[in-house]
Amino acid sequence: MAGDPGRGRLIALGLLAALIVLAADQLSKWWVLDMLDLPALRQVVLLPVLNLTMVWNRGVTFGLLTSFGASGALGLVAVALVVVAALGFWLWRAETRLVAMSIGAIAGGAIGNVVDRLRFGAVVDFIHAHVATPWGDVSWYVFNVADAAIVCGVAALILDSLVLRRHGSRSADPA
């Protein structure tokens, strides 16, 4: 079904989503590093619940696996590129716009973090959401645009798989 025009539109939609996420991620990182100089400032309070906080993440999600050094960074790049290749195959088989855009968002985010690892040996994280509660402060991990796109893409795929598919609400129209 490679010649199916609907499939071609879905692939293009997924690739466009990946490019938009990659561009937004890299532009935001360029801005916080080069224009704002967040590494020197370390933290900028934007709102009572949102800061820009400079973190060099040398591990994976939530800073896990940080003890492997430079070889670990290259290993993480290799794993991420294998995942992106698998996502490309999944995109080729996507049947709905939601799935195509979700796969594109995940792939674009993964590539954005790969670019960081290749350039800096670490991922640039800077978005820090937090809130004070009567039970103490709640602070989320510091993340970036790529991380947000990956999480949203995965959530949309779960929604598609568990909820929309089960209830027959998925759009049968591929594009």
Image (cartoon, rainbow, N blue to C red):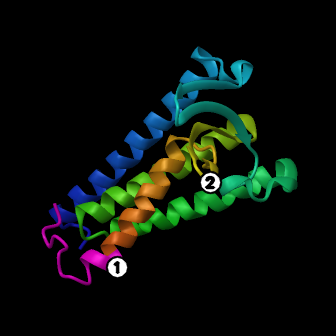
Outermost residue toward the bottom in this view: 166
Find disc 2 in the rendering and name its residue: 135
Amino acid at pointer 1: Leu
- Kindly identify the residue that appears in the image at 24 percent across and 61 percent down: 97
Left or right placement of residue 163 versus residue 72 in this view = left
**Label ID, residue 162:** 1
Q: Quadrant of residue 126?
A: top right
Type of amino acid at the residue the image marks with label 2 = Trp
Q: Which mark, residue 3?
A: none
Q: Earlier in the sequence, mark 2 or mark 1?
A: 2
* Furthest residue in direction front, as rendered: 134
Residue 75 percent across, percent down from the top left:
75, 58
Q: Main secondary structure of the magenta part?
A: loop
Q: Nearer the viewer, mark 2 or mark 1?
A: 2
One can see residue 77 in this view: no
Is residue 38 rendered to the left or right of residue 1?
Answer: right
- Residue 31 is inside the magenta segment: no
Q: Residue at x 81, y 53 (%)?
A: 66
Range of the magenta residues? 161-175
Q: Is residue 20 above or below residue 171?
A: above
Q: Quadrant of the C terminus?
A: bottom left
